[in-house]
Image (cartoon, grey):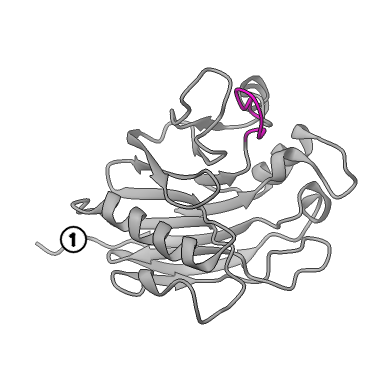
């Protein structure tokens, strides 16, 4: 199964144009089964989606998980999860996160065999640590292989995400920020027990270099059979 994460920057590209169609072209090119998005909704008012539902329905094979609190947003605090049509989605959950700025995480069960969590952590390390703790508490009791994907906002390859050391293996497939000149691996994936990483990478081709200030990150994982 291919999982991907993409901070789409509300569909505003490096040319300062808001172009949802360009973002969708990048998403479609990933050929993923599940795509976790950050900044999928605009920031003010009722937070309408920057990636219109009609565009998704008419020009992709993806369906958004039902995570929004209203009828105009795609996700929760800008975090959304797209799932390829035909894959069963259940147990959608919104997770409020601590910190000075409003943050949240989202999670869903995919095909009854995998929990996917989408995150966009805070700008300050102490807040990121508290947010990781809150996410792990929210997942307590979920006896299912789990993948946490998103913009972790952590520049250091060694510090700040220690809370994931117990129960997860953290992977940084490559430098994903800034899209014009990638210098930092802000976009990462944490895999729990029962998931084997087969391949991973950063999408740098086509319009990915201009569609957002982040590049998409993807991982191919195999769900290991549970012991009998």
SS assignment at label 1: loop
Measuring 48% from the left and 61% from the top, which residue is drawn there? 127
Asked whether residue 39 is drawn in magenta, I would say no
- As drawn, is 82 to the left or to the right of 131? right
Structural crowding at the residue carrying mark 1, measured as other residues with C-alpha within 10 Å and reported as few (<14), some (14–19) or many (≥20): few
Residue reaching furthest bottom? 158
Is residue 22 or residue 60 the one in the foreground?
22
Quarter of the image that includes the C terminus: bottom left
Place of residue 1 in the rendered image (x, y in percent of width and height, measured from the top left): 44, 53
Measuring 54% from the left and 45% from the top, which residue is drawn there? 35
Give the residues in magenta: 41-49
Q: Image height check: is 100 above or below 84?
A: below
Q: Image height check: is 50 above or below 37?
A: above
Q: Image height check: is 58 above or below 183?
A: above
Residue designated by label 1: 226
Residue reaching furthest right? 15
Measuring 81% from the left and 52% from the top, which residue is drawn there? 206
Measuring 81% from the left and 56% from the top, which residue is drawn there? 209
């Amino acid at each position: 199964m291919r999982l991907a994460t993409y901070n789409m920057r509300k569909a505003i590209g490096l040319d300062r144009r808001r172009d949802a169609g360009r973002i969708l072209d990048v998403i479609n090119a990933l050929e993923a089964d599940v795509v976790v998005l950050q900044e999928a909704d605009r920031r003010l008012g009722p937070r309408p989606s920057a990636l219109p539902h009609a565009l998704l329905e008419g020009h992709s094979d993806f369906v958004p998980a039902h995570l929004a609190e209203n009828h105009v947003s795609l996700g929760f605090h800008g975090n959304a999860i797209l799932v390829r049509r035909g894959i069963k989605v259940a147990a959608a959950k919104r997770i409020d996160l601590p910190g000075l700025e409003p943050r949240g995480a989202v999670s869903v069960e995919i095909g009854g065999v995998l929990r996917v969590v989408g995150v966009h952590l805070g700008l300050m390390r102490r807040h990121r640590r508290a947010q990781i703790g809150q996410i792990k508490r929210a997942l307590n009791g979920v006896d299912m292989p789990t993948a946490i994907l998103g913009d972790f906002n952590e520049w250091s390859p060694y510090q700040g995400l220690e809370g994931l050391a117990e129960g997860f293996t953290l992977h940084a497939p490559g430098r994903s920020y800034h899209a014009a000149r990638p210098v930092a691996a802000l976009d990462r994936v944490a895999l729990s027990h029962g998931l084997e990483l087969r391949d991973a990478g950063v999408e740098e081709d086509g319009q990915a270099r201009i569609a957002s200030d982040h590049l998409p990150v993807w991982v191919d994982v195999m769900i290991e059979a549970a012991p009998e």
